[in-house]
């Protein structure tokens, strides 16, 4: 990787952690990605329940709609996000994080439009944008994780990143479900939609802020990673 010979004794885990958590970009990217996973898992977990409770669609029909809408949109997102990140990062590496921050914020209005739409079909179509956004960030997030890590520590960097993302993101469905229970006496079957909307909107802003903060130190942290010898 990067033309560096990394043969030899691998670095100790404690040394990897000390190095990785000395990089502000790495920390902000982990937190931002974990927070966005809260949104992602909440959306995927509770969207079928929302449409089942509030429309006359069968669960099988909802599954077909989501398979095409989510599957197609996420394919466009991951390919388009990678293509766009390559071109924008040629202007400035900070665009790796700018792209994540902007895309997360752009999705927010579509959560409200989708869960308050007058028909199920329109609601599904409006979810295309959030589903695209859910994978636009995939390439830039992982590229940043690798880019700010010394070559010999990149496998550990990816593992720790994914551990944090899943630990934080796994809270999403539970928090959203508890909020739905709290809102049910007032909103009835619409409570799950409001819960997803509240969680997705608020946590997306929080996530976008961390992506933006990561952009501030990204160039310096990547330079530090390249300047460190392989262990």
Image: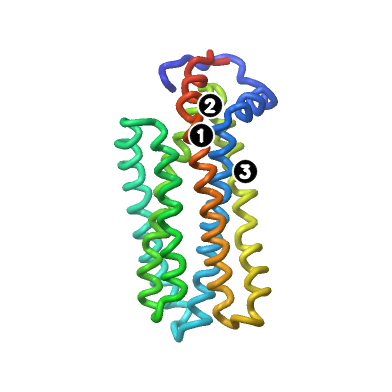
Q: Tell which circle, 3 or 1, labels the residue nearer the N-terminal end.
A: 1
Separation (CA) of disc 3 from disc 1: 12 Å
> Which residue is label 2 attached to?
149
Whether the residues at callouts 3 and 1 have beta carbons within 8 Å, the answer is no
What number is the disc on residue 164? Answer: 3
Q: x%, y% of residue 96? A: 41, 37
CA neighbours of label 2 inside 10 A, class few (<14), some (14 to 19), many (20+): many
Q: Residue at x 49, y 32 (%)?
A: 216
Residue depicted at 61% across the width and 16% down the height: 9
Residue 139 place in picture, x, y as percent: 41, 41
Instruction: Name the residue: 60% across, 28% down.
Output: 20
> Residue shown at 50%/79% (left/top)?
52
Instruction: State the quadrant of the N terminus.
Output: top left
The reply, left or right, for residue 213 in relation to residue 138 is right
Give above or below for 78 relative to 51. above
| Nearest the eye: 181 or 8 | 181
Residue wearing tag 1: 145
Secondary structure under the numbered disc 2 in the rendered image? loop
The alpha-carbon separation of the residues under discs 3 and 2 comes to 16 Å
In the picture as drawn, the residue positioned furthest to the bottom comes out as 56
């Amino acid at each position: 990787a990067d033309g560096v010979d990394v043969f030899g004794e691998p670095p100790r885990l404690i040394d990897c952690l000390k190095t990785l958590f000395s990089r502000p970009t790495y920390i902000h990217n982990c937190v931002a990605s974990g927070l966005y996973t809260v949104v992602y898992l909440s959306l995927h977990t509770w969207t079928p329940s929302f449409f089942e409770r509030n429309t006359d669609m069968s669960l099988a029909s909802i599954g077909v709609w989501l398979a095409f809408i989510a599957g197609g949109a996420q394919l466009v997102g991951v390919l388009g996000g990678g293509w766009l990140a390559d071109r924008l990062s040629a202007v400035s590496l900070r665009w790796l994080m700018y792209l994540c921050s902007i895309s997360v914020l752009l999705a927010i209005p579509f959560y409200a439009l989708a869960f308050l739409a007058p028909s199920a079909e329109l609601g599904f179509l409006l979810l295309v944008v959030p589903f695209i956004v859910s994978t636009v960030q995939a390439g830039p997030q992982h590229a940043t994780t690798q880019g700010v890590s010394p070559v010999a520590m990149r496998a550990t960097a990816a593992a720790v990143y994914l551990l944090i993302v899943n630990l934080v993101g796994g809270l999403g469905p539970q928090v959203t479900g508890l909020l739905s229970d709290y809102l049910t006496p007032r909103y009835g079957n619409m409570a799950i939609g409001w819960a997803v909307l509240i969680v997705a909107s608020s946590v997306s802003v929080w996530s976008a802020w961390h992506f933006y903060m990561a952009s501030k130190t990204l160039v310096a942290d990547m330079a530090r990673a390249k300047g460190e010898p392989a262990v």
